[in-house]
């Protein structure tokens, strides 16, 4: 009987080791796969030219990704500019000012927000944000536009990344010792002074890492962004102009173009570039969090 | 306790499998010995042909109850890649076949015709004159290829009423490829704000008073009313370029008139287009070949109801010869 129990334990252990290994190997396999598939286009084109050329006409053999990379970064940047301050204020309020009950309900709603599928955000963007920009925002600046724009992508994306940023921030704020807050308050500081001089100061690197985590989420946002940004591969003049992101490029063309070898390869290369950018951001966020934990 | 639990789970699993198999087998068991044909046919490809392919498959399965047909839509290129790599038996393709694909063994048979039409918002400021005069190909070229910023009013010699907002498809698709072919170009040459999918294009044009776009006729016309969907209108093309829409050029008000014009060749191809089934190499005797023969014969009667045009007699004959 006892031997059976121990065998069971061993088997369970081996299974779990194997699944853990499999999960970790996947990333490596994805990288290798993308790299192998990018081979043909890398062989025929200069790497720098692929990344820095703006000329994208695949059927003529031109695979410049610059406008897509630029579009990906600008829409992400805009999303973070919009969402970071909002998330920070929300998280400060929820963790320092609000009642426990409100915190509970707000957390519930934020979690639900995180669970909404991207395509629903996309449809909502088309039905609500696009007309809003076309009929109200853009005319304020004297522009007649379609509404499918960098701004629309930024707004939709900022809402999509907010839940993750807020929940990371809440966690970080809750890890600050109560003694610290109490001693600040007992010295006569107001709540706002405590927030400003103790909480925000103490958790600065944590806040940065939360924002970077949100950024890496936003970089890969596909479906919703695809539906509202207008997908024109140019460098935009203003936030009311359309843009084209790497995830949209892949989603738009992958299904249709599998049968043309070099096109396929160029799309895989775009995927590789995107993955490397996101990995870089993830590692940066990880390092920041490590630094934060050491400081606390 | 543990054993009991295990038994319960097993019983549930068996019950589940039993029910699933009942559901899956029911149609096949109705009349098993009516035909000798059986097996499984797997089809994937263009959204444009998907609804019609489903109708064909339904009818074919009624004739040959031993047959199972699985159809999935995922884009013409995906279907093409699937069929060339041997994953599926037939691909649905809604654009011309590229030479690279023929080199790899793509064998194609036309099975239906549909059309792509330019569309505008129902509240367009010059809708009246637009319907009276139609639009010349040159204007389409200036808009979609040269990317010129034109005013709706100025095209028709009126004052400025608002700049045209040009929409195009962002996803690589048969509709865009066909519309570009009408302008002697490729999809990647089309300018304009890129919208995802046929339904997205309908929404974009329906919501933008100054917008112009293009759609498969199946997405523009309502199957029940046979008229363009609410809020969207079709732009008549001034085919003979005489500056006025003649009686013979005026067939855009209902789906049936439109389908008629396409089948008689009064609406040119492109933007009318053939939809294809593609196999890897000529299909051998068997299910795929039988299905193609059915589609070219009886199957064609389903086309009109589903909003497609039948292949002409000559082309059917050619296709059958090619098959045999």
Image (cartoon, rainbow, N blue to C red):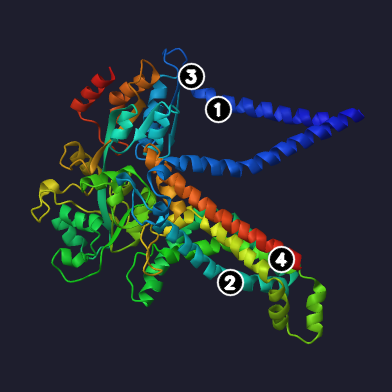
* Residue A132 visible in the displayed image: yes
Residue A292 is tagged as 4
Q: Between label 4 and label 3, give the one nearer the viewer.
A: 4
Q: For the point 40% across and 34% down, which residue is it? A: B81
Q: Alpha-carbon distance for marks 1 and 3?
A: 12 Å
Residue situated furthest right in the rendering: A2
Q: Between label 4 and label 1, give the one nearer the viewer.
A: 4
Q: Which residue is mark 1?
A: B23
Report in which chain the residue with disc 3 lies: B
Report in which chain the residue with disc 1 lies: B
Query: Is residue B240 toward the left or the right of residue B60 in the image?
Result: left
Q: Are marks 1 and 3 on the same chain?
A: yes
Q: For the point 63% across and 61% down, which residue is it? A: A285
Residue A26 spot, x, y in % from top left:
61, 41
Crowding at dot 3, Cα within 10 Å, few <14 / some 14-19 / many 20+, comes out as: few
Q: Do labels 4 and 3 touch, CB within 8 Å?
A: no
Q: Between label 1 and label 3, give the one nearer the viewer.
A: 1
Q: Which residue is mark 3?
A: B30
Is residue B220 depicted above or below B155 in this figure?
above
| Dot 3: element | loop
Q: Which residue is mark 2?
A: A86
Q: Quadrant of residue B224?
A: top left
């Amino acid at each position: 009987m006892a031997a059976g129990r121990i065998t069971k334990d061993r088997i369970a252990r081996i299974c779990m080791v194997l699944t853990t290994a499999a999960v970790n190997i996947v990333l490596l396999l994805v990288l290798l796969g993308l790299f192998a598939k990018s081979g043909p286009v890398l062989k025929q084109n200069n790497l720098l030219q692929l990344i820095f050329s703006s000329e994208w006409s695949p059927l003529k053999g031109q695979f410049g990704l610059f406008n897509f990379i630029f579009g990906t970064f600008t829409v992400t940047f805009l999303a973070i500019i919009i969402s970071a301050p909002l998330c920070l204020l929300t998280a400060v309020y929820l963790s320092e000012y609000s009642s426990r009950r409100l915190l509970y309900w707000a957390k519930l709603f934020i979690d639900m927000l995180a669970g909404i599928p991207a395509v629903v955000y996309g449809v909502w963007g088309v039905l609500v944000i696009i007309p809003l920009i076309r009929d109200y925002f853009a005319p304020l600046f004297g522009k007649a536009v379609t509404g499918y724009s960098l701004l629309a992508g930024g707004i939709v994306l900022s809402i999509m990344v907010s839940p993750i940023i807020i929940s990371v921030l809440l966690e970080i704020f809750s890890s600050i010792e109560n003694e610290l807050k109490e001693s600040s308050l007992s010295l006569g500081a107001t709540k706002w002074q405590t927030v400003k001089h103790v909480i925000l100061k103490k958790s600065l690197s944590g806040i940065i890492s939360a924002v970077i985590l949100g950024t890496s989420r936003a970089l890969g946002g596909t479906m919703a962004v695809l539906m509202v940004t207008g997908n024109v591969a140019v460098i935009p003049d203003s936030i009311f102009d359309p843009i084209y992101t790497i995830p949209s490029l892949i989603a738009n063309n992958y299904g249709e173009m599998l049968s043309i070898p070099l096109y396929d390869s160029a799309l895989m290369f775009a995927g590789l570039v995107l993955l490397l950018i996101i990995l870089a951001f993830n590692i940066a966020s990880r390092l920041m969090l490590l630094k934060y934990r050491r400081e606390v | 306790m543990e054993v009991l639990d295990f038994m319960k789970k097993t019983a549930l699993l068996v019950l589940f499998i039993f029910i699933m198999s009942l559901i899956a087998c029911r149609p096949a068991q109705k009349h098993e010995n009516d035909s000798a044909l059986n097996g499984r046919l797997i089809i994937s490809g263009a959204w444009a042909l998907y609804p019609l392919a489903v109708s064909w498959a339904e009818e074919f399965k009624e004739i040959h109850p031993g047959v199972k047909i699985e159809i999935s839509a995922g884009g013409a290129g995906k279907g093409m890649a699937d069929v060339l790599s041997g994953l599926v038996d037939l691909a649905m393709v809604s654009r011309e076949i590229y030479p690279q694909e023929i080199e790899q063994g793509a064998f194609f048979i036309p099975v239906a015709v549909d059309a792509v039409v330019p569309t505008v918002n129902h509240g367009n400021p010059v809708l009246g004159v637009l319907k009276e005069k139609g639009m010349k190909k040159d204007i389409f070229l200036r808009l979609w290829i040269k990317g010129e910023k034109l005013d709706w009013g100025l095209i028709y010699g009126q004052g400025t009423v608002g700049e045209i907002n040009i929409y195009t498809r962002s996803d690589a698709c048969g509709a865009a490829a066909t519309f570009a072919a009408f302008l002697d170009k490729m999809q990647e040459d089309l300018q304009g704000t890129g919208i995802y999918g046929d339904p997205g294009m309908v929404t974009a044009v329906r919501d933008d008073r100054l917008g112009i776009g293009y759609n498969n006729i199946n997405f523009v016309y309502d199957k029940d009313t046979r008229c363009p969907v609410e809020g969207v209108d079709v732009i008549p093309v001034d085919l003979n370029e005489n500056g006025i829409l003649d009686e013979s050029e005026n067939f855009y008000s209902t789906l049936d008139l439109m389908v008629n014009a396409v089948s008689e060749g009064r609406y040119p191809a492109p933007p009318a287009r053939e939809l294809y089934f593609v196999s890897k190499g000529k299909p051998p005797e068997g299910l795929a070949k039988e299905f193609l023969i059915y589609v070219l014969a009886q199957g064609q009667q389903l086309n009109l109801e589903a909003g497609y045009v039948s292949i002409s007699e000559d082309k059917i004959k050619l296709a059958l010869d090619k098959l045999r």
